[in-house]
Amino acid sequence: MVFKRRDKRSMLQSAWATIYPKGGWGRAIQYIKHRVRRLPDPPHKIARGIFVGILMSFTPLFGFHVVAAGVFGWLVRGNVLAAVLSTFVGNPLTFPLIAAAALQLGHYVLGTEFTSGSEVGLVGKFVGAWNDLTHNFSSMFYDRPADWSMLNTFYLEVFLPYLVGGLICGTVAAIAAYYITLPLITAYKNRRKGRLKARLAAIRDKVGNKADKTP
């Protein structure tokens, strides 16, 4: 394969790369800023894509943030690549803060609370929901009843509050990002356009001078 890595990563190396990218977070951020600024679309479409990407990164759609950002970025006529790149806001360093804020705000808005029950904390809710999924899937092939209790608990105490709180927090963050990035991208593109015009004018003058000197 043309794009196959020569030095195949182990599972541990791949997991570590998601937490700490090669070259560090600073280099990764600079790369994304460079890619976003040089996107060919108008600034308002790029900023719209950034809005969508940041909003999706605040949702509990773990594993589907990139797909959701791409789909919604296309639906709102934003830049899809900008939407996908902006999901970088949700990363292993920020997810604990996002999850804590989204869950607390979501429970406050819904008037509910997070209870430990028979499981231990948030991790226990995920484990219990996963166990229900695997059990109910296997129950389709074996003669045993399905059990939705932990999935129901997970939905009411984790997914729904996270979704509500995440959409509120994400909307605030996405609006702020939109109005910050729009003038910055506009200014960058105007400067770049000015440099290109100046370069083209210099080339034309050089060609014109050579033509004048030709006997």
Image (spheres, rainbow, N blue to C red):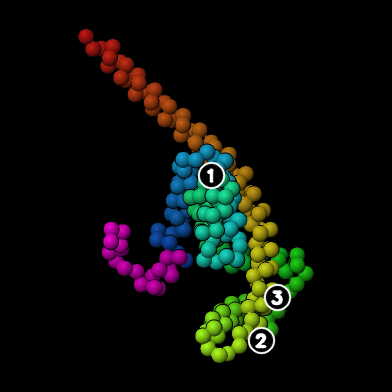
Report the span colored magenta: 1-18
Residue 49 lies in the magenta-colored region:
no
Is 43 displayed left or right of 116 in the figure? left
Mark 1 element type: helix
Q: Residue furthest top?
A: 215
Mark 2 element type: loop
Residue flagged by tag 1: what amino acid is it?
Answer: Ile
Q: Residue furthest right?
A: 111
Q: Earlier in the sequence, mark 1 or mark 3?
A: 1
Residue at x 53% of width, y 52% of height = 83
Which residue is tagged 3?
114
How many residues crowd mark 1 within 10 Å: few (<14), some (14–19), many (20+)? many
| Residue 89 occupies quadrant | bottom right
Which residue is tagged 2?
118
Viewer-nearest residue: 150 or 17? 150
How many residues crowd mark 3 within 10 Å: few (<14), some (14–19), many (20+)? some
| Residue 116 occupies quadrant | bottom right
In three-dimensional space, the C-alpha distance between marks 1 and 3, rounded to whole angstroms, equals 38 Å
Residue flagged by tag 2: what amino acid is it?
Answer: Ser
Residue 11 lies in the magenta-colored region:
yes
Residue at x 67% of width, y 68% of height = 160
Can you say which quadrant of the picture contains the N terminus? Answer: bottom left
Residue at x 38% of width, y 26% of height = 200
**In the rendered view, would you say 122 is above or below 141?**
above
Which residue is tagged 1?
46
Q: Residue furthest left?
A: 215
